[in-house]
Image (cartoon, rainbow, N blue to C red):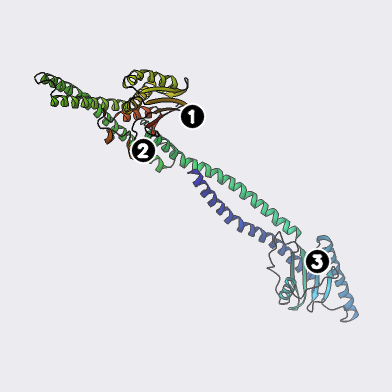
Amino acid sequence: MRTRLLPLLIALMTAVLLALGFPLAMITAGVEQQKVVVDRIDDAARFAALAQFVTARPDAGNATKSSDEGERRATLGAELARYYDLYGIRAGVFYRDRKPMCAAPRDLTVARDGEAAQAFSEALAGRRSHDPRQIWPWDDHGRITVASPVIRDGDVVAVVVTDSPTDQLRSRILRGWLVTAAGECVAMLIALAAAFRLTGWVLRPVRVLDAASHDIATGRMKARVAATAGPPELRRLARSFNEMADHVEDVLEQQRAFVADASHQLRNPLSALLLRIELLALELPDGNEEIASVRTEGKRLARVLDDLLGLALAEHTAADLQLTDIGALAAERVDSWRPLADDKGVRLTYEGHSAVTGWADPVALSSALDAVVDNALKFTPPTEPVTVAVAPDGERVTITVTDRGPGLTDDELARIGDRFWRSSRHQNVSGSGLGLSITRALLAAGGADIGYAPHPPHGLKVTVTVPRTGP
């Protein structure tokens, strides 16, 4: 779930940071340029103040007036030249017909189109430049042109034009963007850390709930959840889960107790009933079919009650897991069943390693193997083999029991192990239909498993897997 939640949170935070970062970068560029424009407007206004008394052309007026104007023009020219030498900003004062009054450098002209022409036209209308085109760090040839009118007696007689390079402006904008990007990166790292903490805080109770649910599903009914972490909704869910687990455990315990008590209580009346049947049989002729049928059904009922009690105990008893030599245990069970196999004419053999260890309850595993081998011997005809093999398989140990009996169909394989289920083809074979159910309960308590498959050309293959690692 974290792999799905984290990308969503990261995408949302990235979108928020980008939505804030791009406008901030544009504002940074605009502020830096506005500083330059205001500075150029102030410089242009200072030059306009010097130029408003130098409005006559060099060939106009009397000598005295020309001498005064010439001195002022020389002063203005010196200021413009010093300004150009110091800052590298081209500046000039131009008459209305675009002819220069003074300029630095001397070849400075006003273009008749573009931004410079637009700024010049605005100044002729009595307006200062206020909104030149925005300069970006990648504008290698971009310049800022600012024009200011020279007003005398309420009329625009000339225009001051400054043409500034933008290298330093672009450098400042780029530095500002780098600072913004660094801040965005730091904010992103903080957001990532917060996202990890947030998802961990939210998902930790979910992981605990998942682990507890898995424990209960695999038979560890004592698993519970500590409702002390996470959002209030998940803490409430944890408390509800614990209450549900308590109720489920109580119901299962009541079922087990009922089955065990019923099996135990019915066993005594059934024994007394069988005894009375035997007493009645003494009064009847030998070979009476009805009394033989009653004996058979009574014994079958007694076997069912014994198996019910065994199933209740198997589901109730906790496994005593130990590091066990699975190979030696399986070989010992084969030796125990060999006399019965020899009596039936079935060839019971053991194959595999003699020392393969795994974690299991020796008593439960022995009982499970007894049920599987007993089932194989029941359905295997004389002279046919039944093989028990043990082999390591990665992190598990496999015990395989194969026979050459009639086998089961796919539909029957899906139902094998269900309580009281028996194949309709095998109703004449003694049994209660609980043996493999007891086997599955015994194995599940210790973390083992059992599976069934066909054994070509005919027969059944039962595979018991035992973990090799400790609980």
Q: Which residue was labeled with disc 1?
A: 395
Which residue extends farthest left? Answer: 283
Give the amino acid at mark 2: Phe
Give the amino acid at mark 3: Arg
| 284 on left or right of 451 | left
- Residue 30, given in percent of the width and then of the height, sits at 66, 61
Q: CA distance from mark 2 to mark 1?
A: 32 Å
Disc 3 to disc 2: CB gap under 8 Å: no
Q: In terms of sequence position, does the residue under pointer 3 or pointer 1 come before the other?
A: 3
Q: Nearer the viewer, residue 123 or 324?
A: 324
- Residue 340, given in percent of the width and then of the height, sits at 32, 20
Give the amino acid at mark 1: Glu
Residue in the image at 25% along x and 30% along y: 428
Assess disc 2: are there few (<14), some (14-19) or many (≥20) residues with their C-alpha within 10 Å of its C-alpha: some
Residue in the image at 89% along x and 81% along y: 62
Q: Quadrant of the C terminus?
A: top left
